[in-house]
Amino acid sequence: MPDLGPTARFDVEEAPDELALVQALLNTASVGRFPDLLGEVETAGEWLAAAGLTAAGSAGAGAAQSAGQSVGRSADAARPTETDLVQLRAFRDELRRLTRGSGGSTSWSGVAALDLGADGVVELKPGGGAGSASVISKVLSLVFVAQRGDTWRRLKTCRNERCQVAFYDRSRNNSGAWHDVKTCGNQANLRAHRERNR
């Protein structure tokens, strides 16, 4: 897996397997002193390239690597457009609502195909063309696999309205509500205690 910096900046343990990439996308959002990594074309392009995603279709990191270029140099080729960023932020916000237990309000569709390998294993392959559709297709395929493996329900967003960091709930009964009980959980409990005493 590539370095998925968005999750590491919140000092949160990554979700298992490729669900970590979905978690990282959720954690690109601005929280506290941390900026929105999908807010500017340059930072978004850098993160998409580092995460192995591309919003530029055929000119992405994979194509650059096969041509002998480094991933760092391919970041310019994989730079998303402003329209891509608007769509990616809207998609991320929809995923955040779902991980908070709120229903989605928009339908997102991407092109994907089932592929039967020589070993007899069927795999879901993302498609989606170029731009933000390619990224959304990849992420939707990862969510689908996580749902089939029953790990999706453990990817949550902190209930603290000012936080909303995405975390993977490793509690036995899947009851976690805070990305960090010592900070967000204690703050919420203290507020509730004050309200009860009024």
Image: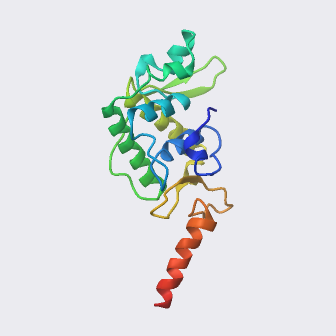
Q: Position of residue 2 (x, y in %)?
A: 62, 32
Viewer-nearest residue: 136 or 153: 136
Tell me the residue at 51%/80% (across/down).
192
In this rendered view, identify the residue nearer to me: 35 or 80: 35
In front here: 119 or 92? 92
Residue 16 point in image, percent of width and height: 65, 43
Instruction: Say left or right for 51 vs 59.
Output: right
Q: Return the residue found at the far right.
A: 172
**x 39%, y 37%: residue:** 40
Q: Residue furthest front?
A: 33
* 134 vs 28: above or below: above
Image-based side of 178 in relation to 131, left or right: right
Residue 55 vertical placement versus 102 (above, below): above
Using the image, determine if residue 71 lies above or below residue 107: above
Q: Where does residue 195 sit, x and y in percent of width and height?
A: 47, 84
The quadrant of the image that shows the C terminus is: bottom left
Residue farthest top in this picture: 67
The outermost residue toward the left is 83
Q: Does residue 111 show up? A: no
- Here the colouring is rainbow
Residue visible at 63% across and 67% down? Answer: 182
Q: Residue at x 42, y 31 (%)?
A: 42
194 or 153, nearer to the observer: 194
Q: Quadrant of the N terminus?
A: top right
